[in-house]
Image (cartoon, rainbow, N blue to C red):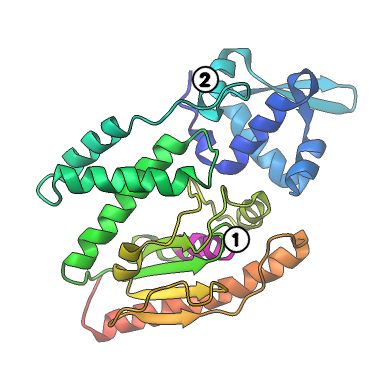
Amino acid sequence: MGSLTSLGDPTRARILRLIRESEDGKALVSRIADALELRQPTISHHMKSLRDEGIVVREPDGRRVWYSIAPDYAARVDALLGDGARPAPDPDLGRIATDLTLRYRGVFGPETVRAKVVESYELLAGRSQSPMLASRTAAFAAARLDALKRSQGKPGAVPSVLFVCVQNAGRSQIAAGILRQLAGDRVLVRTAGSEPAGDVRSAIVGALDEIGVSLGDEFPKPLTDEAVRAADVVVTMGCGDACPIYPGRRYVDWELDDPVGKSPAQIRVIRDDIDGRVRTLLQELVAERSSAGLTE
């Protein structure tokens, strides 16, 4: 069997959840597209990836084609998505803290690492019912420790940008996804929300997928002090004065419509507006780095 790498994409996880919860355990692409508010070609693209990994099977029925979860993968999909009849098991915070202590040996002590892990879990658990809470806790704690390490050291040659909106499920994720796509490892990109949602909106994932941008395993994260301290540029989008102000950071506020609840066409307009702003920001960052005498 494969490694279920396709499920690193949140849209594919939602597709499988819809198939699993549908009548008779099978669904049509058209119905999945309607449920997720995405275009049928977008769903077909994701379905092909799931089929290529053998996770779903295709069942022609006249002019219609049904998709169901492959029997050999059913148990693994349930384990990954969570059993709808039972809550996901509590994360093994001790194991997560032990592993991260090894990762940050010589940088942070065990007490600091464990405190970040426990706090990260508490920040996420109150907002998300995701069955991926354990891995999200580990990722969020690691990101916070990375940010803390950066804020306590010398500024790096690679600039750091923090995008902040209210739910961290729309505007900030669009901006971050596009900047990562354009800049690669030339810019360190983070996101946060003043009142984060449980998951990135499926319509946002679809709008980015249309232009070849994947969010991968990104998820909404609360705004933390160390994330702001570690950023060279903080871009806010409709979150008011939620961001603390620290000397030496550049603060930019982008006035943008909230894409939540908007039609696909309206979301594309917002996406393209953000795209233009991100490209300008990247040009500025590259120019600043060049003027400072920093080379690739």
Relative to residue 8, is residue 204 depicted above or below? below
Task: Establish if 247 lies above or below 155.
Answer: below
- Distance Cα–Cα, label 1 vs label 2: 30 Å
Of residues 151 and 284, the one nearer the viewer is 151
Residue drawn at x 41%, y 65% is 183
Dot 1: element: loop
Q: Nearer the viewer, residue 32 or 116?
A: 116
In percent of width and height, residue 190 lies at: 40, 61
What amino acid type should be assigned to the residue bearing mark 1?
A: Gly
* Magenta stretch: includes residue 40: no
Outermost residue to the right: 62
Q: Position of residue 53 (x, y in %)?
A: 55, 26
Q: Residues in magenta?
A: 170-179
**Mark 1 vs mark 2: which is more N-terminal?**
2
Quarter containing the C terminus = bottom left
Residue 155: give x, y in percent of width and height: 21, 72
Q: Return the residue at label 2.
A: 76
Q: Determine the secondary structure under disc 2.
A: helix
Question: What crowding class fits label 2: few (fewer than 14 Cα within 10 Å), some (14-19), or many (20 or more)?
Answer: some
Please tell me how crowded label 1 is: few (under 14), some (14-19), or many (20+) other residues with Cα within 10 Å: many
- Residue at the disc numbered 1: 170
Q: Is residue 9 left or right of residue 69?
A: left
Instruction: Identify the residue at horizontal 63%, vertical 17% (top origin).
Output: 70
Kind of residue at disc 2: Arg
Left or right: 247, with 101 as reference point: right
Q: Residue at x 27, y 86 (%)?
A: 291
